[in-house]
Image (cartoon, rainbow, N blue to C red):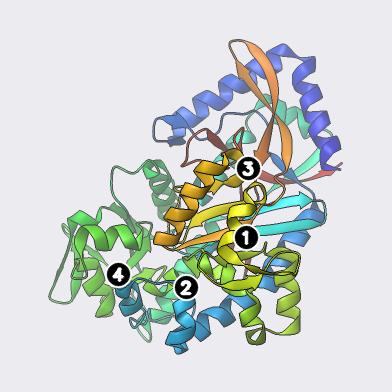
């Protein structure tokens, strides 16, 4: 059904050159007016959104719902058992910060999976961003913008399209966590959207600021360098911060400010609530997928959880000298086997973002792969089985001409309260590494679609 919807949408653009030109002009001007830019480039560069059928969205929600208890079980065991926790390859300072209780139940009240529909009924999750799940503001704003495109208005004559908003889930997870942290008092939160002012996602912080303001929540965009902590209060200038919407990476915060940074001290003293918490680092590690899929840990999970992991988590291992079970079930020595199977494997740093350091084995020669494996053995990396990357045609408009190119696309459901799907991000790229931060990619809004 989604293929039919895509064809109908593209037919509208092809049948009327003016419709494509007018839609492109509307997209460009609206993104400029609303600050929908990633650094110096527009967030969206194509004229069609992502269409998800209700059946696929149900599969997405069901898969996330089945996997979350397994991730929670791994997280709980990691907190309780230092020997088990070693599998996640935490740094010493990260391990130390696990002792800081966030004041609320979930270590990551707002998070996001990165996944691919390898087939209609095959959904594989390749990463779990439990630290700074970005993109919800961009995605929601693009959805509202697309309703104003002439081609989208025409498309709605024959198809019903519904957005899948993500910002409400983020806001409610923030406020719910703050209420738990707050206890018996009822003062409203004073939010700091916290990150460095020079990051390319600053435009999204503005979108969240505007959204929080419309929802009656006081907020400011704050750079960690402007924070001070005195007399039990975290401040930025004259603004008293009680709730931190943490967009800054914990690693960057510690590397630049140290363990005595005002934010760290305030959170440690329970003078400010920070979402997500320091404990989010456990599952943010790429090794979390290795923990779930490693045969050594099978006894930790229920039969239902093991079935969900087998169905939805690609084979993943922390790269080290050890014996393990290969994807086909045969026993192997991991490092020699990794060296010999370049074309079916991916190497990923254990703790990084934006596609940094990822090596897709089938895109490099054997010498480059061997060099990458050597690096991966010197600092924590995971090796993961290649997943089939889905592709769809997306129309663009350049130099007065409509063109349609096949692009790789991912499916990234947001999770609210650590419990269920609340929104979905789609990124597309002509490159096999689908990541806007890495360059060359584009975000598109995601809609549920059905014929009228």
Query: Sequence-wise, which precedes: disc 3 or disc 4?
Result: 4
| Picture disc at residue 242 | 4
| Picture disc at residue 337 | 1
Query: Sequence-wise, which precedes: disc 3 or disc 2?
Result: 2
In the picture, measured across the screen, residue 31 lies left or right of residue 264, that is: right
Crowd around label 3: few <14 · some 14–19 · many ≥20 (10 Å): some
Residue found at x 58% / y 11%: 399
Image location (x, y in percent) of residue 404: 71, 23
Query: Outermost residue toward the bottom?
Result: 80
Image location (x, y in percent) of residue 90: 39, 72
In the picture, measured across the screen, residue 37 lies left or right of residue 17, that is: left
Spatial CA distance of label 4 from label 1 is 51 Å
Image location (x, y in percent) of residue 237: 16, 57
The residue wearing badge 2 is 88
Residue found at x 24% / y 80%: 269
Closest to the camera, between mark 4 and mark 2, is 2
Spatial CA distance of label 2 from label 1 is 22 Å
Look at the numbered disc 2 and give the secondary structure of its residue: helix
Whether the residues at callouts 4 and 2 have beta carbons within 8 Å, the answer is no
Residue nearer the viewer, 392 or 236? 392
Q: Is any atom of residue 188 visible in this view?
A: no
Spatial CA distance of label 3 from label 4 is 48 Å
Spatial CA distance of label 3 from label 2 is 27 Å
Closest to the camera, between mark 1 and mark 3, is 1
Closest to the camera, between mark 3 and mark 2, is 3
The residue wearing badge 3 is 362
């Amino acid at each position: 059904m989604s293929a039919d919807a895509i064809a109908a949408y593209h037919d509208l653009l092809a049948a009327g050159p003016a419709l494509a030109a007018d839609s492109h002009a509307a997209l460009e001007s609206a993104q400029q007016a609303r600050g929908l830019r990633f650094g110096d480039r527009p967030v969206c560069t194509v004229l069609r959104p992502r269409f998800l059928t209700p059946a696929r969205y149900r599969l997405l929600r069901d898969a996330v719902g089945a996997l979350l208890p397994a991730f929670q079980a791994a997280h709980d065991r990691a907190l309780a058992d230092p020997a088990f926790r070693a599998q996640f390859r935490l740094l010493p300072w990260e391990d130390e910060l696990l002792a800081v209780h966030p004041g609320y139940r979930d270590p990551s009240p707002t998070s996001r999976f990165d996944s691919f529909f390898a087939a209609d009924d095959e959904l594989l999750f390749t990463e779990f961003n439990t630290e700074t799940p970005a993109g919800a503001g961009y995605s929601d704003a693009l959805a509202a913008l697309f309703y104003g495109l002439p081609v989208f208005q025409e498309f709605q004559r024959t198809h019903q399209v519904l957005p899948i908003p993500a910002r409400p889930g983020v806001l409610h997870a923030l406020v719910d966590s703050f209420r738990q942290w707050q206890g018996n008092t009822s003062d409203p939160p004073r939010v700091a959207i916290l990150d460095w002012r020079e990051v390319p996602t600053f435009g999204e912080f503005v979108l969240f600021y505007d959204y929080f303001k419309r929802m009656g929540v006081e907020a400011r965009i704050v750079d960690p360098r402007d924070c001070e902590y005195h007399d039990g209060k975290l401040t930025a200038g004259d603004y008293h911060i009680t709730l931190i919407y943490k967009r800054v990476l914990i690693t960057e915060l510690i590397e630049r400010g140290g363990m005595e940074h005002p934010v760290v001290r305030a959170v440690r003293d329970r003078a400010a609530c920070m979402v997500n918490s320091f404990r989010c680092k456990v599952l943010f590690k790429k090794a979390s997928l290795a923990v779930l899929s490693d045969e050594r840990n099978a006894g930790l999970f229920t039969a239902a959880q093991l079935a969900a992991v087998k169905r939805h988590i690609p084979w993943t291992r922390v790269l080290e000298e050890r014996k393990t079970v290969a994807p086909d079930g045969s026993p192997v020595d991991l490092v020699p086997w990794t060296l010999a199977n370049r074309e079916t494997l991916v190497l990923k740093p254990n703790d990084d973002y934006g596609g940094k350091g990822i090596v897709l084995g089938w895109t490099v020669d054997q010498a480059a792969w061997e060099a990458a494996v050597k690096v991966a053995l010197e600092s924590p990396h995971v090796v993961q089985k290649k997943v089939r990357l889905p592709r769809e045609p997306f129309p663009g408009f350049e130099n007065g001409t409509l063109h349609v190119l096949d692009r790789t696309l991912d499916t990234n459901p947001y999770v609210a309260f650590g419990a269920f799907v609340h929104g979905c991000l789609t990124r597309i790229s002509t490159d096999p590494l689908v990541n806007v931060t890495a360059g060359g990619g584009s975000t598109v809004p995601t809609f549920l679609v059905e014929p009228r």
